[in-house]
Amino acid sequence: MENSVAHLTRRKPKKPKKKWKKPLIITFSILILLGGLGFIFQKELVRLGFNMFAAGTVKEALDKSYKGVGDREAPVVQHTEPFSLLLLGIDQRDKEPSRSDTIIYSVVRPEDNKVLLLSIPRDSYTEIVGRDVKSKINSAYAHGEAKMAMDTVEKLLENKVDFYAAINFHGLKDIVDAVGGVELPIKKNIENKNKAHEKLFVEANKPIYNGEEALGYVRYREDSDFNRTMRHRIFLSAFMNRALEVKNLTKIPDVIQIAGSNFTTNMTSDFIVNFAESLYMKDSAPTISNYMLKGDGAMRGGTWYYDLSEDDLKYVRGMIASWLDPNTTQLIEPESTDESGTADKSDSADKG
């Protein structure tokens, strides 16, 4: 009996089972899985959050910005179909009429995730539809706002203008600040030196530019019309990329609220929201193709104008038609232009 007891007392005690180990592994695995799913379905989650918390506010703000275009019927366009959009940057300065300082005819192909931006120099000499005169194209908005601008551009390019979006540059500063600034490829300082122009200075080689600096970047006049319109296209692309970042999607309602009375369009809120949602769900930002109408400077009655090249107009009209055709499989891509080309042979900075 004693031996039995001794034997029993010499047994090594069993180690307690680590009951926590298996549940911890399972929990850790679930966290990894959820983290992976969150990364994979990040866009779907953000879209869900947007629809739940922000869509109503955005639609309400966009409804206030809606402004029809006289007797022009609203186009029936699905947000997945190619459509044209006339972008107008209105630079209202003291004692000056509200002319469109920026005129960009764009074609959007949602299914291909591609955008064409065609800059029309503001001094382009053309027929102003509704006034029966030939003058600078930027005067169309001053005399007849969006309708006259759309009619004039439509006649010039011989292709439809479905929508317009006009923004006063006064609203640009706060909008850029709302998304945390933009990246701009400024390689040398930008500065107004003409005493007749407002003071303007933008420092080169900064990683991010705030709203006031971005406004200076697009308003700078003391070089060529080619460079100015190029800066406008670069800014649009930079702002689009910034706004599409996940961290900025929650700021979209604030951006639209800030735009307020500085922004008008004939696109309905439903169309804009549906299009923006489909754009964001793409795997990458849209591919943007740029072009500027070519021509030469000319003086008429002491006023400087920009005479557009008929050959270039013919080329551009065909290019636009190919982009607007939903059945086009091989788009006509813009030819490259640079500062030394015929796109701009005269400096219009001080010529009105």
Image (cartoon, grey):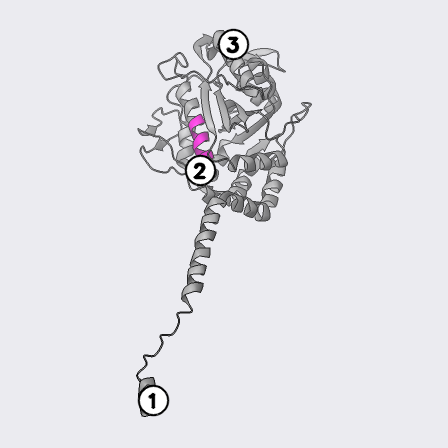
Q: Quadrant of residue 177?
A: top left
Q: Is residue 34 left or right of residue 83?
A: left
Direction bottom: furthest residue: 2
According to the picture, the residue beneath numbered tag 3 turns out to be 314
Mark 1, residues whose alpha carbon is within 10 Å: few (<14), some, or many (≥20)?
A: few
Task: From this view, report whether residue 200 is shown above or below residue 26.
Answer: above
Viewer-side residue, 323 vs 314? 323
Query: Residue flagged by tag 3: what amino acid is it?
Result: Lys
Number of labelled discs?
3
Q: Which circle's residue, 1 or 2, is located before the other in the chain?
A: 1
Q: CA distance from mark 1 to mark 2?
A: 79 Å
**What span is colored magenta in the figure?**
233-242
Q: Earlier in the sequence, mark 2 or mark 3?
A: 2
Q: Amino acid at mark 2?
A: Arg
Task: Name the image quarter holding the C terminus.
Answer: top left
Mark 1 — residue? 5
Location of residue 195 in the rendering, given as x and y in whole percent from the top left corner = 36, 25
Residue 181 within the magenta-colored segment of the rendering: no
- Labelled pair 1, 3 in contact (Cβ < 8 Å): no
Q: Nearer the viewer, residue 294 or 326?
A: 326
User: How crowded is the residue under tag 3: few (<14 C-alpha within 10 Å), some, or many (20+)?
Assistant: few
Q: Secondary structure at mark 3?
A: helix
